[in-house]
Image (tube, rainbow, N blue to C red):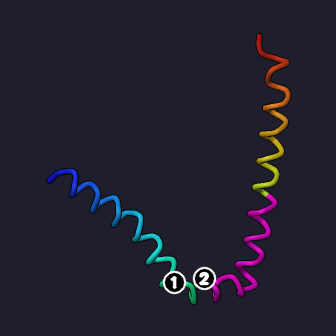
Amino acid sequence: MIGMIFILLFAVGHCIPIVIAGSSTAAVKKILESERWQGAGSWFRKSAGAVIALLAVYFILNPFFTS
């Protein structure tokens, strides 16, 4: 009985995000077309790129400075 409850909860937990994403496509499209959010998206992409570049430098140099 407990196994069936866990399977049900697992299924519901995986379906809810899909249902929410499918239900909100019009809102997401509206947000993506907004100039304000496009500027924020550009800033986020640049920031994420800088973070990835810094992590790359860290992972490349880290073996040379650890004993």
Indicate the amino acid at tag 2.
Val
Residue identified by numbered label 1? 24
Q: Give the side of residue 1 with respect to residue 42, left or right.
A: left
Span colored in magenta = 28-46
Please identify the quadrant where the C terminus is shown.
top right
Q: Give the side of residue 17 with respect to residue 30, left or right.
A: left
Real-space CA distance between mark 2 and mark 1, rounded to the nearest whole angstrom: 6 Å
Q: Residue 56, percent across and down?
A: 82, 39
Residue at x 75%, y 78% (from the top left corner): 38
Q: Residue 9, percent across and down?
A: 29, 60
Q: Quadrant of residue 42?
A: bottom right
52 lies above or below 57: below
Let me know if residue 33 is in the magenta part.
Answer: yes
Q: Residue 21, percent across and down?
A: 51, 77
Per the image, label 2 sits on a secondary structure element best described as: helix
Residue at x 51%, y 84% (from the top left corner): 24
Residue identified by numbered label 2? 28
- In the foreground, 5 or 51: 5
Indicate the amino acid at tag 1.
Ser
The 10 Å Cα crowd at callout 2, few under 14, some 14 to 19, many 20 or more, is: few
Q: Residue 48, percent across and down?
A: 75, 55
The 10 Å Cα crowd at callout 1, few under 14, some 14 to 19, many 20 or more, is: few
Q: Main secondary structure of the magenta part?
A: helix
